[in-house]
Image (spheres, rainbow, N blue to C red):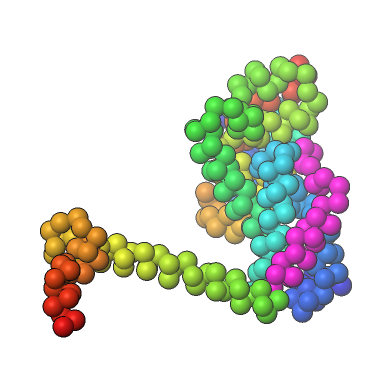
Amino acid sequence: MDQTELVAAARSGDHNAFRELVRLLEPRVAATVIGMLGHCQEAEDVGQETFIRFYNALDKFRCEAKVETYVTRIAINLSLNELKRRQRKALLFVDQPEADLENLSNREIVEIDRDTQTTVRLAVRQLAPRFRAVIVLRLIDGYSTRETAEILNLPIGTVLSRLSRAQKKLKIILEPVFEGKV
Amino acid sequence: MKNKWLDLLRRSFDDHLSRPDQETLKRVLAESAELRSEKRRLTDLRNLIASSSVESFRPFFTERVMDVVAGRRQTRTPVNGWRSALGEVFRPVAIAAALTIVGLLILGLSISGNLSLEGLLGIPEYSLENIVYAME
């Protein structure tokens, strides 16, 4: 069964069809949510909430969009909400480890002994949420520029300019990685 | 290296370039070693970011989601549905009732001009003699 058929089966109450959808879509949702929030409990909660929202919206889903794109849209919106909540919390409480990881200096990111992938993930987390979202969707999830624009409900020109600015910043942060200093 | 060529190079990764732009980029890439090096760096950066993807949550994620879904399905029985609908209706009714009571108290206060309970509730202040007289 393809994803559209699985949605139809899940809508008519087939529990196993929905389980299969979760299994198939977990990698995409995990890449999006962990790319946005980092590997933390909140990311897992947002991932879970993504599928619960999808389950609740099964009756409304008319397969006009691809299932994967639809679920990614839920995941990215919930991640952006979580980042707003994290920022509000960071304003109120000093000790917020996850928020602190989003405010490291370039030197802190590359100096501490980390593997390259962790360094790259930390570098992505230094981007403002709107820039991070385009990088995650376009470069990590591998959506086309047009699909990225559709998911974020933005004009293609805005996506292109955000991608360009985000890459410039990432290039500066990750310069030592390319020079082999990390 | 001109910013114009750099922008064109960056755009080539994410946008469909027109035929003249493609030819221009090809030409300037052939001419400029610096731009070729920039292209390599951008390609490396993008590959590095793509490879940083984490594609799974903790083990048994699907089971945890299905547990929550099963829990929601149970709460969707007709009786529970009726109860939750009642709960949803109760809140606005309770808020409206509370506001009405506060409104009436303020109205009673403004009419009677004092803070007595009778005044607040809009009950006329009868003395014991008045009540006995009324009963006779």
Residue A12, quarter of picture: bottom right
Query: Where is the N terminus of chain A found, in terms of image quarters?
Result: bottom right
Is A40 on the left or on the right of A162, as rendered? Answer: right
Residue B111, quarter of picture: bottom left
The spot of residue A154 in percent (x, y) is 53, 55
Residue at left offset 58%, top offset 42% = A83
Q: How many marks?
A: 0
Q: Nearer the viewer, residue A136 or B125?
A: B125
Residue at left offset 63%, top offset 39% = B9
Extent of the magenta region: B50-76
The spot of residue A13 in percent (x, y) is 78, 76
Q: Nearer the viewer, residue A45 or B118?
A: B118
Above or below, B27 against A55 in this view is: above
Asked whether A9 falls inside the magenta stretch, the response is no
The spot of residue A95 in percent (x, y) is 59, 27
Is B20 on the left or on the right of B67, as rendered? Answer: left
Residue at left offset 75%, top offset 60% = B68
Is B30 on the left or on the right of B11, as rendered? Answer: right
Secondary structure predominantly adopted by residues drawn in magenta: helix
Q: Nearer the viewer, residue B118 or B126?
A: B126
Asked whether B72 falls inside the magenta stretch, the response is yes
Residue at left offset 18%, top offset 60% = B109
Above or below, A30 against B119 in this view is: above
Residue B66, quarter of picture: bottom right
Q: From this viewpoint, is residue A141 visible?
A: no
The spot of residue A164 in percent (x, y) is 58, 39
